[in-house]
Each structure stands twice: as structure tokens, then as C-alpha cells.
Amino acid sequence: MDGLRPTEIHWIANHYIGVSGGYLGDFTYPSHREFYAAYCDLKVDPEEYPGTTRQRFLAVLSSAEPRSQAAIVRGVARRFPVGSEVQRTPEARAKLLAMAKRCSQIAAVEPTSPKLASELVHQALADAASLLEAQGPVSALDRVHTALHGYLKAMCRSAGLDMAMLPTDPGVTQIFKLMRENHPALRDMGVQDDAMRKIVFSIGNILDALNPLRNRGSLAHANDQLVERDEALLVVNLTRSIIQYLDGRTQREIARDDGQQGVDPAAFSPP
């Protein structure tokens, strides 16, 4: 999916925001500089570009990659809300957000809706999707971590794995280790079994690294320093991909057992 077209960039600046005397909306040079961090979760210095605030904004938006364009466009919607000027109508805002949605579709792995999941998992994934679209990946990081934690618990329960052997309130790394070693869906990984086992083993290392990112680099706590946008997006992508993979493996195992042994798929549903 491509980013913004030149006509769309022109419409955002000249129609939605509006230009007067070379100034873009009510931006001053300082407020325009602060806009990208405050409203877009981006590190951008418009003073690297020559010209008026309008010219600098056009240069920044035109040169940005699609996912950054999406963040800027959503920032515009927040910075210049409906009704703040006559041209900023609900219809114009809807058009603006549609552009952002189109650009952001290449920004992350598509949201997943795993079959084997509790209401908590589905709600956490829905929250993460909304936060990713509205505020960026840093805001979504905590919720995807919660979704993964809940999903791993549901996956273990579905296979009757005894989590009582784990410490009280086990984390994602401990639950995944139990599942990796005992879950029937991960016993046979096909013709590339050795290679896939190395990949699945590496997932455990990834999960182990997610914990400090979530605890010390996300909005889960009052952290002074947050993980950067690109790193947060990587975490969102990885977490969604892990859930998608595990859910696919589990559903395949359910279908295999149902066909060969007459197992009721409802028995695999989380409580």
C-alpha cells in the first residue's frame, strides 16, 4: 500500500488545516516544531527544511514513510479538531482519518482474532489495535503484552497442562517454556521440524526480552524513558505474529484430533 498522494498532502495543508500568510493554521515556528513529538509520537525537526511553516510541513509530510505519514495525519486530527475552523467538518475529519488508516495498513502485522482466547485476550487485542491507530505503537505495547500473556495461559489450559508446577502468577517466559515442552500442537512441526524447533526455541528468548521492555519502557508504568517508536512497532508485530502462529498450530491440532480420534473441539475452548 502506498503512502499519501500529492493531492492528498495538498488537501491536508491547504483545505483541512488552512493557510494564511504562509502560516499553517495557527502554527508558529515553535509550536510546529513541538507538534511532531506532542501529537504524532515522532522525532522530527522541521527546521531542517527551509521556508514557512506550510512549506516545512509539506516537506516533512511528503518525505515521511507511510507509517509516519499516518502518525502525522492523526496528529493533525487531534491538533485541529472538528469545529475549530469552518472547514474542519466531521466529513473532512473522516476523510483525514481514512487516509491515515490506509497509510498505517503497511505499518504492522494485521490484527489477529485468535479462536483459542478468553474475553480478556480479545479485549486486550482490540485495545491494542485502537491504541496503535490513534496514538502509535508505544501506547499499544502494554496491551499486546497482556494479550500474549492471556493467550499463552488459555493455550496451556486448553491442552490440560498443569500450571500449578509454575511459580505463582507466572510470566510469559515461564508459561511458554511449559507449553513448548508439553503442548501437543508443538510436538511435530512437519518436514522442517529441526529448523522450526530452533525458531520456536528463539521465541522464548524474544518473550524473555519483552518483559523488561513492557515493564521499564512502556506506558504500563510511570517510566521516564519509553522505548522508541520503531522498536515498539517491532514488538507489536512480533507479538501478533506469535499469537497467529500458535493459534494456527493449535487449530490444526484440534482438527487433526477431531478427525482421527473424535475429540470434541469445544473441549479446547478456554474456560
Image (cartoon, rainbow, N blue to C red):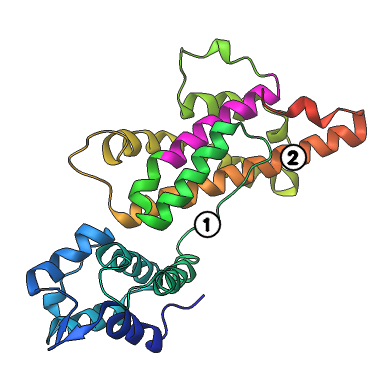
The main secondary structure of the magenta stretch is: helix
Percent across and percent down for residue 244 are: 61, 46
Residue 111, above or below 194: below
Residue wearing tag 1: 109
Q: Which mark is residue 251?
A: 2
Percent across and percent down for residue 98 are: 47, 70
Percent across and percent down for residue 68 are: 34, 68
Q: Quadrant of residue 135?
A: bottom left
Percent across and percent down for residue 54 are: 19, 83
Dot 1 falls on a residue whose secondary structure is loop
Q: Residue at x 31, y 33 (%)?
A: 215
The span from disc 2 to disc 1 (Cα, nearest Å) is 20 Å
User: Where, quadrant-wise, is the C terminus in this rendering?
Assistant: top right
How many callouts does the rendering have?
2
Q: Let me know if residue 202 appears in the view.
A: no
Residue 79 falls inside the magenta stretch: no
Tag 2: amino acid: Gln
Q: Earlier in the sequence, mark 2 or mark 1?
A: 1
Tag 1: amino acid: Val
Q: The magenta stretch spans which residues? A: 143-160
Decide if residue 195 is on the left or right side of residue 36: right
Q: Quadrant of residue 189?
A: top right
